[in-house]
Amino acid sequence: MIGAAELARMKPTATLVNTGSGGVVEEETLLTALRRGDLHSAGLDVTTGGPRTDPSDPLRNEPHLVALPHVGSATEATRAVMVELPAQHRSIAGRPPRTHPLPGTPSLPGRRAPQAG
């Protein structure tokens, strides 16, 4: 989804951040853009093929790129909420859920569809 054409539209002072999914960014094209100075920096929470463990991997050695092994959400506060939410779900606790689907999306079994407005 993010290749040469998309990177060429970015300012040379821009930082590209991908927290979505590996493969969204063409990594070789990104490395080329960083090395040429077409893009200032990049932060990847995900990479194609999962975490990069090879010390000689170009992604690990690019000074203007930070790559994480898909743990960008791994703060204590986020993890605490991730544990708490399922415990508070009505199917477990007998109460209405704290979270709801976005309007226009199908509801999960046992949930009412959200009301617009």
Image: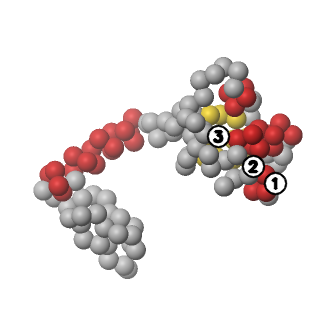
Q: CA distance from mark 2 to mark 1?
A: 11 Å
Secondary element at tag 1 = helix
Residue picked out by circle 2: 14
Secondary element at tag 3 = strand
Q: Where, quadrant-wise, is the C terminus in this rendering?
A: bottom left
Q: Residue furthest bottom?
A: 117
Q: Residue at x 66, y 20 (%)?
A: 55
Q: Residue at x 79, y 52 (%)?
A: 4
Vertical placement of 98 versus 106: above or below?
above
Residue 26, image x, y percentages: 70, 46
Residue 54, image x, y percentages: 63, 22
Amino acid residing under circle 3:
Gly
Answer with mark 3 or mark 2, whichever residue precedes in sequence: 2
Secondary element at tag 2 = loop
Residue picked out by circle 1: 8
Q: In the image, is 8 to the left or to the right of 42?
A: right
Q: Residue at x 75, y 43 (%)?
A: 30
Answer with mark 2 or mark 1, whichever residue precedes in sequence: 1
Mark seen at residue 107: none
Q: Residue at x 83, y 36 (%)?
A: 35
Q: In the image, is 89 to the left or to the right of 66?
A: left
Q: Is residue 10 visible?
A: no
Residue placed most toward the observer, 35 or 47: 47
Say few, some or many: other residues with alpha carbon within 10 Å of mark 3 (under 14 / 14 to 19 / 20 or more). some
Q: Residue furthest right?
A: 36
Q: Where, quadrant-wise, is the N terminus in this rendering?
A: bottom right
Residue 58, image x, y percentages: 73, 29
Residue picked out by circle 3: 43
Residue placed most toward the observer, 70 or 53: 53
